[in-house]
Amino acid sequence: MTTNLFDIDVHLKECTKNSCIMEILFDRRLLTIEHSDFLYTRPNKIETLYLNKVEGLLFGTPIGDALGIKFESIPPKSVLKKYGLIKGFHPKAHISDDTQLTFLTLEVFLRNGWFDPKKLADVFVKERITGIGKTMKSFIKNYKDLKVPWYLAGVNSAGNGSLMRLSPIVIPHLLNPSKELWCDAVVTTYLVYHDKLAISSAVAFTSLLWECFRMRMAPESEWWLEKYITVARELEGDNSNYTTRYGEIRYKGPAWYFVENVLSTALKENWSLKELSNRVSSGAYLLETVPVVLYTLMKCADLPYNALIEAVTHSKDSDTIGAIVGYFIGALHSSKAFPKHLLEPMIKSKVLPNKYTKDIINTLKYLKNVEKNTLEKARLDESNTILRI
């Protein structure tokens, strides 16, 4: 089918929310995911929003990122042999593009009141980003150098960068849940990743992350997989073709089916994360990252520090997988999930730039302000936060 782009710019410029943009992208056949009813559902209400969970969410990304950065691309077997389990920051630890892109995304929201994809594109090409991946490089070249419109500048890539900057997407909706949550996840991912697996996994991870804010303790192991598959299959569909790369298991077909079968078997046979990583690999490809992250949570979500250690030690893309696991355990257990030796270098700006800590404070202030002006009030609990608001 031919894609009709006549007057699309005019219509996109009229949009002030991503539900509007999503409908245009579907209408012009630019979105290849299934046009599922799920995208029009309202997320379950969060009865009490604990601000220390928001802290945990936003500190989790840089903690996991910095914990894994110096071991990125080193085979996990070699990391384990030379360093043992990774329990603390390397002396030369620093943040990478995972953290930068997360906070650039958050800043666009704090400045503009929504995740405007055009504004995101402008920020991504303007800022100097450390350790940028090849998909983002291609997007920047398309948008900045070749002057391709933002809605066409993305790349057909199933890279895990689609998940690493995902955590801020829940922020605007925590006190006012609506379908806009899913629309924000779709459009902000589509901006760079024109791929079914990238978008479907981003929405599925958003649904998991949302539920973490509604929980006071880790769910049963099976919940992570069942919830992921329910959403991911709806959006990816049954006709996609993704192929495994370096792991011991060979597969070609829908990604959700691979994830479901591998992790069901892993759980039944009680594989270690090390065994899973060997069998599916653990690089920057979503067919590797998704099962590694989910299995880490399935095995260790009730032990947040262990989850981080396992994720970083047993993955090749250790910084990004660490960042993703970091924001999940932060949202589930709050900023209290992280031991002092990982949290203090963030708060004291030894690893995390002070401007990003200020972004977290401004996010907490934003939520307090929204709570004051919300008619259908969720309870907001600001006790036990580690930052002064």
Image (spheres, grey):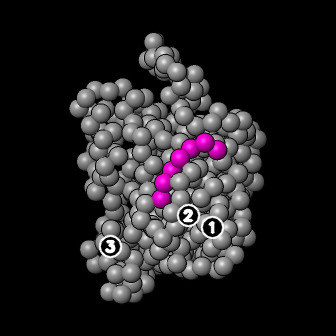
- Residue ID at (45%, 17%): 5
* Residue type highlighted by circle 2: Pro
Start-end of magenta stretch: 238-244
Question: Is residue 240 in the magenta section?
Answer: yes
Question: How far separated are the C-alphas under marks 3 and 2?
Answer: 19 Å
Looking at the rendered structure, the secondary structure element under dot 1 is: helix
Query: Is 254 on the left or on the right of 192, as rendered?
Result: right
Query: Is 121 on the left or on the right of 337, as rendered?
Result: left
Please name whichever residue, 147 or 75, is drawn nearer the observer in this view of the structure: 75
- Residue ID at (32%, 86%): 82
Q: Would you say residue 86 is visible in this rendering?
A: yes
* Residue type highlighted by circle 3: Ile
* Among the 4 quarters of the image, the one containing residue 270: bottom right
The circle on residue 74 is 3
The residue where tag 1 is placed is 263
Is most of the magenta stretch helix, strand or loop?
Answer: loop
CB atoms of marks 1 and 3 within 8 Å: no
* Residue type highlighted by circle 1: Leu
The residue where tag 2 is placed is 291
CB atoms of marks 1 and 2 within 8 Å: yes
Q: Residue 159, percent across and down?
A: 42, 51
Q: Residue 115, percent across and down?
A: 49, 37
Please name whichever residue, 208 or 356, is drawn nearer the observer in this view of the structure: 208
Question: Is residue 50 in the magenta section?
Answer: no
